[in-house]
Image (cartoon, rainbow, N blue to C red):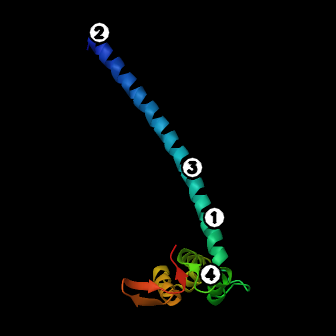
């Protein structure tokens, strides 16, 4: 077989293409390894944060000085006066109490969080009265 200039040029192009393919494979492997390392570090940070969170609420029960809902309920009443608590303040206090005290206990005991939230809101909601325009909450003022 005789090497013609066209055959030589074709062989050179094939060799060059093969070398280029090898280089890009090495680059993509190095990039993938770097991404894997970064991903593992992020996963490790997330795992540590999750472990700390679980540790916080699994230490057992509420803190000794945790207020009852009754205590929290009357704190805004003392500040604003009976029946003059803004509904937003009442709702924010109820939500914070749920997040800080009720939710950790529910999770620890294996209860569903959304079901527990619905029951808590139902049990701690202010009474309503039927008016001409519909139901109205008593015990707070709309802002």
The residue shown at (66%, 74%) is 55
Report the residue marked by disc 3.
38
Residue 46: x and y in percent read 58, 61
Distance from disc 3 to disc 2, alpha carbons, whole Å, reads 49 Å
Nearer mark to the viewer, of 2 and 1: 1
Residue lying at 73% horizontally and 85% vertically, measured from the top left? 65
Judge by depth and name the residue closer to the eye, 20 or 111. 111
The residue that mark 4 highlights is 101
- 29 and 112: which one is in front? 112
Closest to the camera, between mark 1 and mark 4, is: 4
**Residues packed near mark 4 inside 10 Å, few (<14), some (14 to 19) or many (20 plus):** some
* Dot placed on the residue nearer the N-terminal end, 3 or 1: 3
- The secondary structure type at the circle numbered 2 is helix
Residue 1 image-quadrant placement: top left
Q: Secondary structure at mark 4?
A: helix
Please tell me whether mark 1 sits on a helix, a strand or a loop: helix
Q: Earlier in the sequence, mark 4 or mark 3?
A: 3
Give the residue at mark 1: 48
Furthest toward the right, the residue is: 65
**Which quadrant of the structure image shows residue 84?**
bottom right
Q: Could you say where residue 57 lies in the image, as x and y percent from the top left?
A: 64, 78
Q: In screen coordinates, is 111 left or right of 14?
A: right
Q: Give how far apart the Cα atoms at labels 4 and 3 are.
A: 36 Å
List the single residue furthest toward the front. Answer: 132
Q: Which disc is residue 126 wearing?
A: none
Mark toward the start of the polypeptide (3 vs 2): 2
Q: Which residue is mark 2?
A: 5
For discs 4 and 2, the disc positioned in front in the rendered view: 4
Distance in Å between CA atoms under marks 2 and 1: 64 Å
Circle 3: is it few (<14), some (14-19), or many (20+) Cα within 10 Å? Answer: few
């Amino acid at each position: 077989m005789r090497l013609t200039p066209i055959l030589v040029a074709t062989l050179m192009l094939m060799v060059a293409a093969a070398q280029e393919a090898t280089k890009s494979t090495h680059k993509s492997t190095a990039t993938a390894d770097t991404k894997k390392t970064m991903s593992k570090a992020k996963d490790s940070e997330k795992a540590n944060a999750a472990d700390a969170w679980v540790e916080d609420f699994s230490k057992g029960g509420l803190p000794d000085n945790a207020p009852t809902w009754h205590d929290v309920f009357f704190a805004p009443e003392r500040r604003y006066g009976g029946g003059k608590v803004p509904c937003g303040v009442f709702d924010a206090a109820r939500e914070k109490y749920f997040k800080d005290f009720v939710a950790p206990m529910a999770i620890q005991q294996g209860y569903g969080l959304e079901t527990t939230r619905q029951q808590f809101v139902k049990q701690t909601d202010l009474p309503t009265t039927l008016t001409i325009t519909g139901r109205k909450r008593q015990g707070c003022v709309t802002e």
